[in-house]
Structures are given as C-alpha cells and as structure tokens.
Image (cartoon, coloured by chain):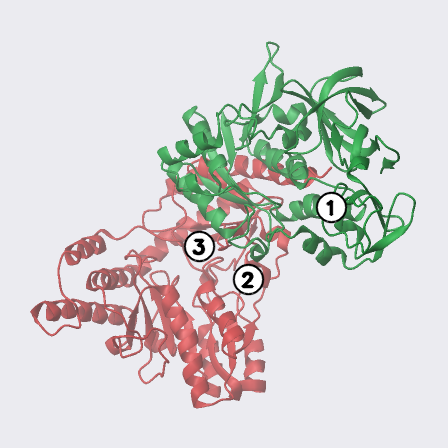
Amino acid sequence: MRVLAALSGGVDSAVAAARAVDAGHDVVGVHMALSRTRDQFRTGSRGCCSIEDAGDARRAADVLGIPYYVWDLSERFEETVVADFVAEYEAGRTPNPCVRCNEHIKFATLLDKAVALGFDAVCTGHYARIETRADGTRELHRARDLAKDQSYVLAVMGPERLARSMFPLGDVASKEVTRAEAAARGLSVSAKPDSYDICFVADGDTQGFLRSRLGSQPGEIVDGSGAVLGQHDGAYAFTVGQRKGLSIGRPAPDGKPRYVLSVEPVNNRVVVGSADELAVHAVEADRAVWFADANGSFACSLQVRAHGSAVPARATVRDGVVEVVLDAAGDLRGVAPGQSAVLYDGTRVLGQATVTSAQRVTAGVAR
Amino acid sequence: MYLDHAATTPMLPEAARVLAEQLVRTGNPSSLHGSGRAARRVVEEARERLAAALGARPSEVVWTSGGTEADNLAVKGLFWSRRNEDKRRRRLLVSAVEHHAVLDPAFWMAEHAGAELVLLPVDGDGTVDVDALGEELERNGDQVALISVMWANNEVGTLQPLDDVVALARRHGVPVHADAVQAVGQVPVDFGASGLDAMTVSGHKVGGPGGAGALLARRGLDLTPVLHGGGQERGVRSGTLDAALIASFGLAVEHAAAGRDAFAARVGALRDSLVAGVEAAVPDAVLRGPRDTSRRLPANAHFTFPGCEGDSLLYLLDSAGIEASTGSACQAGVPRPSHVLLAMGVDEVAARGALRFSLGHPSTAADVDALLAALPGVVDRARAAGLATVGSVT
C-alpha cells in the first residue's frame, strides 16, 4: 500500500512510520505545519509544532529512508480548530481541540489530500487498535496499553476514515517499549519528552490565550440561588468542575471549597456550588458519529475525558440525540457541554457524540 | 531525471579530481614555509583563473564560503562603509525579486542597523523597473548607500537590465552589487565591462564544490568586514583559505565560462522544447518570466499550474522519478508562496502552484520526454488533491 505517515517530530509517529516501512508499505512522511507564524509555536513550547519538531520529523524520515514533505495546513487549522476552540469557550462550552484536529485536520484535510494524491492510508502514532471483522468491516478498539490509550480522541473519525487509517502502535505494551524500539532503530527522538497541553497554546496558559483572543468581559459569580458571590473577568475562562481562579471573598456556609457548576454565556454568569453538586447521573449529546448502526437502547460504558475512565451506562438514541443514563448516579462529576462523549462496548468504540447537557444528581442541568 | 540544476549541479569531473588531489595536501596558504607557499600558489592560481574567466583582476577576488556569505558581505559591508563616510547614506535599494541571501541581510540591516530599505518593483516578467529606480535616485540619490540587483533571477530566470541600473547609479555616485550566482556559465558575465562595483559568484552552481564562493569587489571599493579574524583576503574577509575548495572552484568557473556559448545553445534548445511540450501537455499552465528567450536564462523554465499545490506536484513528480523544485525557499520548513512571483503581481493562490525546471550539463532530450510523459497525469492528480483540501471543510 501507499501510506502517508504523519510525522509530528515525536517518538510515537516516528516508530509508527518505521513499522509501516517494515510491513512493506511504500511510505512517505508528511509533517503538518499548523501555524504560519511559527514563532507562535517556538522551540521550547510544550506542544508538537515548533521548528525543532519539524527538523526532528525530517531527521526521522531520513533515518527511515522515506521522502519527507511539509504540508501547510495552517489556514484550515486556524479555521477549524483554533477558532472553534475560542468560539466554544466563548459560548460557555468545553471543547477538546485534539478531537477537533482529528475530525477536521488529520483524518479529514490530510487524509483527503493523501487519498487524492494516490495514497491508500494515513499512518499515525496514536495508541489505538483497529480490528477487522470477518465481513471486512473495521472496529476501533482501545490500545493494549490502557495508560496510553487514545481511542477517545479518535472516536470522532467514523468508519469510512477508519478504513483508511493505520495505528501501528496499538498493540505495544507501553510507551517504554516504543522508546526502546526508537532507540534500537537509531531514531534520535527516542528520548524526547511526550507532548502534552494544547499545541497552539505554547506556554500552557490557556486562560491567557483566551483572554488575548476574547478580551475582558467582566461578569458575576453566583451560587445556585442566584446570590452574587464575586466577579470574574470573562466567563470563557471557566469550565465546569474548575476550582482554581474563583476569587470569591467569603467562604461557603459549609466551609467547603466551591467549584464551577455551569457557565452561562447569555448573562455572562458563572454558577458555583459544592463538589457534591458536580455529580452527574445522565448526559445528553448530539452530532453523533457511529462505527456501526446504533438504534434504540443499549448497554455501554461512557467516557467523557481523554484521560478519564469509562463508567457503565445505558444509551438511548432517538432522532439523532443520544441520552446516556449512568448505571450508578454520581459515577461522573463535572461534565460540561462541548465535551466528547465516547461510548464503548468493552474495548470497542461504538461512537461518539458532543455533550449538550448534563443532569446533575442534586438539582439543575448544566447547559 | 534531475531537473533541478539551479539548486545544485553535478561537479565537473576535472573539478572533482583537483579537489581530491588538493584535499590530501597540507599547507595553510598564510604560512611562510614551503607547504604554505605551495598552498598559496594553488590559491593564487585559482584566483587568476577565476578573475580571467569573469573579466576581473585577481586582486578583486575575495574568497568566501559561498554565495550567501558574499551577498552578506556586499550588502552589509557596503552599507556600513558608505554610511560611515556619509551619515545621510542610509537607503538600501534592492530589487523585490532578490534571493534571500540578499533580501534577508537587507531586512536585517533595516531592523538592526538603521538602514532604510527600498524594494525596487518589478514588472510582470520579473524585470526591475528602471524608471522607478531612476525616480528614487533623483529624489534621494544623495541618501543611497548601495543598490543590489541580481544578474539573473534564480526562480523565473529573468535577466536584469544591469547596464541601465549601473548607468543610473553612476550618475548619482552609488555603488552597485549584483548576485551573479545563476548567471555564470549561462550568459556572458564580464565584471570589468559590467561597471559593477561588486558581484557574487558561487562554486556549486557551476560544477564546482559546495562551500566555495567569491565576492568580486572593484579595486578601491571600501568594504567594512563582516567576519573578523586573521585578516586574510585584503582584511575584508578573515578565515583560513581552503586551497582545495578554491582550486576546484576556480577550475569550475573557468570551464563554465569557456563552455558557456555551447552550453547555452544546447540547453537553450532543450529548454525551448520543454516549454513547448509543457504548454501542449497542460494548456492552462502559465509560463512565468520572460517569453523572450533573450531575456531569460537558457537553462530555466518556470510555470504555475492553476488549481495545484506546488508541494503536491513535487511529490507526484518525485514518485515518478522526476526531481524538480517549486523554486522558492521554505520558511521554517513551511512552503510559502514565492516572494518573486508575488512581486511580479501573481496572486497568492496561483503562486502556490509554481514549479521550476532547470537544466544542466547532463540534461538530455530523454529527461524532457520523461517529464512530458508524466506531467499531464501529475497535474490532474495534484489538481484533484488541491480541490480535495478545499472541499473538506464541513
């Protein structure tokens, strides 16, 4: 097969590309340039988009003996990931930009361009497994190493794009195995630290980034009864479940810490309450993407964060809306609109949808 | 099939032989003992060869590490020496289509050394607007430190009207530098007859080694040094000379100049068939640079392909075994629309579909045939990929 290996400059994508070469595929490496002014993604940033990373990606391609190209996807990235990230926070929701990037960039723009150029598949260093059933259809599963599993952020891609994807690292036992393999292959990125945080927020200061895009928007912090407890400088800087950054002068009546329960962009208010009030018993989600037909009501497990655990639940699909009721109310806490709800059957991804509301155990609905 | 000779071209066998011979010899050309004298003799013979081939005096040759260093020395060295003479001379006039080795030092001087950068406009063929230069000199001639206009453009092959530039500059007492890296070996280059004050040449573009270049600097031209140290090269450019590179470089330039007419005739005809073939195979391809072949480099052909991304074209050609270039430099690894095309008035979308084909000594009709056979399919596919990218917004 002709395989396009997306090379971030990190160790995972380099080893994934190496495995694709070993499997006998005709592999070409592509590094995605996601910012036009690369100063923004300076060396030393904690993401994966610095000039240094582009150089590391090229060096890895050279070691593997494969061609290497840089594709400028910066405009599309700004439109579909960065702008969406800002707009979602402004609307009081909590987006996951890695999910948006997989949805709009890696397994959309990149994949479509690759297919148009004659490639059969895109190979990435994601930790997830693809299993092919007897009838040829493919399933997306959690990685063997559950600590590294990235099936959550991939669930958005749907079956057609999965059919053109390769995740050669899905069955590695641990990240250390990947690093050892990189070292054995002479890939100089073997000891490079993992990327984390949001790649376009180079200094890790998400609130500062949002402030620079959205400016100051002062408003009130209130409790469940509507009593004003303090002021904020922009509701966009708050996300459900957040504790830090709430400058409330007086303590709660029960003396316990307060958390954001919901963000109300319409009246620019942030509602806070106790930790207990974060407990959720059901979520509603839309914009569902399924790997196989999903109708009626079925048992599953629900995961709402990239690094969270999945909890047992029952999902009901009706008119494109998914309602997921937890088997044990309170198993999840602090679920915000905008988050991706991924449904699993064991290790198999059933599909994903975007949370529109979460019903709290105590009272009230986070919207 | 290698169609990227403007990037670099194979070494002449004679130049490679001389390089290998000299590499195993010991001797610093600055040393006074026998080994040093022997090395110095090699360097000075090469200086004489190169000077003779390019219409310069040996004393006008300043060896450098390549074209980029020579361009930096010309832009910075001339600017500083001129401004030190006369504080008013802060204007730095460079054409908008210069190589980055001239443009970037010029931008740097504007940012860090108080230069006022004036980019000279070009027409749709990439030719410098001499009238605009004349007006600028009429208005601000007494404030101009130097003019830098390349002999021939590296992307679209346009030959610049240097006679007119030099004549205008003379009238205002302004020195002129030209980057002649692409011109040597393709068109007649006579430094003395040109009236230029400084001129850049490079080794690896003419069948010599990489890492060797020279700035020809008119006798009496005051250049502020950029590299400081042992005072080699008239005190203008310090650093131990590499006798092997220099010997090989000098020989390559001599060969390139001597073989120029035959090369230009043969490769020019090949280029003409390439251009005609591309236009027949891909009717909407747009030739960039002058159509009049007397105004462009004989080895250069440059097109934009509507609806295509240059990097898609490059990849598809590469996988068909054909090596070409978009012609423009990457910025931090990111392909950018060419500043040359933008200066010529080409819009950014069209400029993204640029491809440069450049021929060299080994080029044959078979190379052109292979390109023409692959190109229609490549362009169709690249066009589909271009549209796929645009269409993927949901």
Task: Say above or below: B258 vs B353.
Answer: below
**x and y percentages locating residue B312 in the rendered image:** 54, 41
Q: Which residue is mark 3?
A: B300
Q: CA distance from mark 3 to mark 2?
A: 13 Å
Q: Residue at x 75, y 20 (%)?
A: A313
Q: Amino acid at mark 3?
A: Asn
State which quadrant residue A364 falls in.
top right
> Residue reaching furthest left?
B34
For the N terminus of chain B, which image quadrant?
A: top left
Q: Which residue is mark 1?
A: A243
Q: Earlier in the sequence, mark 3 or mark 2?
A: 2
**x and y percentages locating residue B315 in the rendered image:** 49, 40
Q: CA distance from mark 1 to mark 2?
A: 63 Å
Helix, strand or loop for disc 3: strand
Q: Which residue is mark 2?
A: B125
Name the chain under label 3. Answer: B
Nearer the observer: mark 1 or 2; the answer is 1
